[in-house]
Image (cartoon, helix red, strand yellow):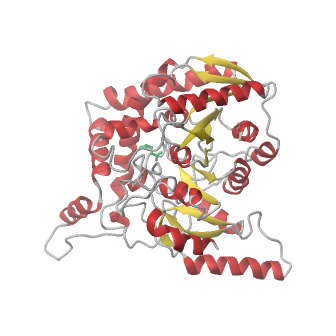
Amino acid sequence: AHLARIDATDEKVHAFLHVDREGALAQARAVDAKRAAGEKLGPLAGVPLALKDIFTTVGVPTTVGSKILEGWIPPYDATLTRKLKEADVVILGKTNMDEFAMGSSTENSAYGPTGNPWDLTKIPGGSGGGSAAALAAFQAPLAIGTDTGGSIRQPAAVTGTVGVKPTYGGVSRYGMVAFSSSLDQGGPCARTVLDAALLHEVIGGHDPLDSTSIDAPVPPVVEAARNGSVAGMRVGVVKQFRGEGFQAGVTQRFDESVELLKELGAEVVEVDCPSFDLAMAAYYLIAPSECSSNLARFDAMRYGLRVGDDGTKSAEEVTALTREAGFGDEVKRRIILGTYALSSGYYDAYYGSAQKVRTLITKDFEKAFEQVDVIVSPTTPTTAFAIGERTDDPLAMYLADICTIPTNLAGNSAMSLPCGLAPEDGLPVGLQIIAPAMKDDRLYKVGAAVE
Ligand code: GLN
């Protein structure tokens, strides 16, 4: 049924880069066979899922939305892919994304944009726009995203779905193509808080193949999602996430959510996080710096595309020609920015300062979490904007993540869930809930209460 739904809708939505029809049917039949034989089934047996094209899948193309990996078939599964298979999930295919997860609209995909199922002329968010659109178009009940600065939560917000950025280290990065390794985090996407929790539990947990993976059990997210409540909880509203730049309908729905939290028994207080004003600037030094280092591996020798290899050119020339042809504009912009920020003589001023800001943001969170159990904010300052509206203005594009980036810099956990439609355009608004590191269960407890 889900493959039929994809057939009927994906020409317009373009959520998928690759539909693995045969693989999905084979997985589904394997589940049926297990069931018929009375064998023990995995916790998500037979549930279809849309996988962001950033996770390696053995035998199935993995492009990361880039021409540079066109035609590359990974020889191994990401840990997350393996866990999905072990849970008997049916992987429908690989979803569209901004190239190397750099963007907020999925327009940076080398394979064309994805439409927002609420209004196909609008962006579905990014970088994980394909996964969010697949959920909103009812092509899949579950999806996987990755969140470096907001790429799970912002697409969830603008498509009226649920997305969770787990605590950094909570879900293995092994086999997840690296953008900014100290910020990247895979996580669950779904249409309900409980569905997201069920998926979170399957993909989370320690992985010896990822040196930054946390060696502790997954927080009790499913139990929390089944027992939603905010009674007696203290909830913080960030002073800095209001006012200028926030669409009126977004603020209105957010204020209503805060009222609902109070009605349900939460105590709401304002928290002051002055360093959040610097988060965007710090992020756009740290993320490009790590990207410039990570993307050095695409040298035309190891993976995918190779341009100009006609026997007359040096290896350096082939590498340069391949990177010139294989990377898109935004990826090149970030590699140049990052290379500059890391270069000798500038390193302390740029990367060094950004790391200090990162510490200040972490301290703002620590101080806030001494007063409150969770923090809430709008996920994004606006609802979905029009395709093409911000493509010539990178700074306007970057602003979409103003409320989500601090969490990545500090490494704690956050969720976006729908909180109504903006009256002025009828498009979904996202409520963001932020919890301390390894307290991901609080997101689900609060999310299930206000859902
Ligand atoms: N939009 C942000 C960026 O372009 C975040 C992307 C992400 O979380 N992968 O870097």
- Quarter placement of the C terminus: top right
Res 257 quadrant in image = top right
Would residue 396 be found to the left or right of residue 270 on screen? left
Res 407 quadrant in image = top right
Q: How many marks?
A: 0
Residue found at the far left of this picture? 312
User: Residue 42 location in percent, x, y?
Assistant: 76, 67
Name the foreground residue: 300 vs 345: 300
Name the foreground residue: 233 vs 348: 233
Q: Residue at x 74, y 68 (%)?
A: 45
User: Residue 340 location in percent, x, y?
Assistant: 26, 38
The quarter of the rendering in which ligand 1 is drawn is top left
Residue 342 in sight in this render: yes
Residue 377 in sight in this render: no
Q: Residue at x 49, y 68 (%)?
A: 10
User: Residue 444 location in percent, x, y?
Assistant: 72, 41
Residue found at the far right of this picture? 38
Position of residue 65 relative to residue 381, above or below, is below
Position of residue 231 relative to residue 135, above or below, is above
Would residue 321 be found to the left or right of residue 299 on screen? left
Would residue 100 be found to the left or right of residue 19 on screen? left
Name the foreground residue: 345 vs 73: 73
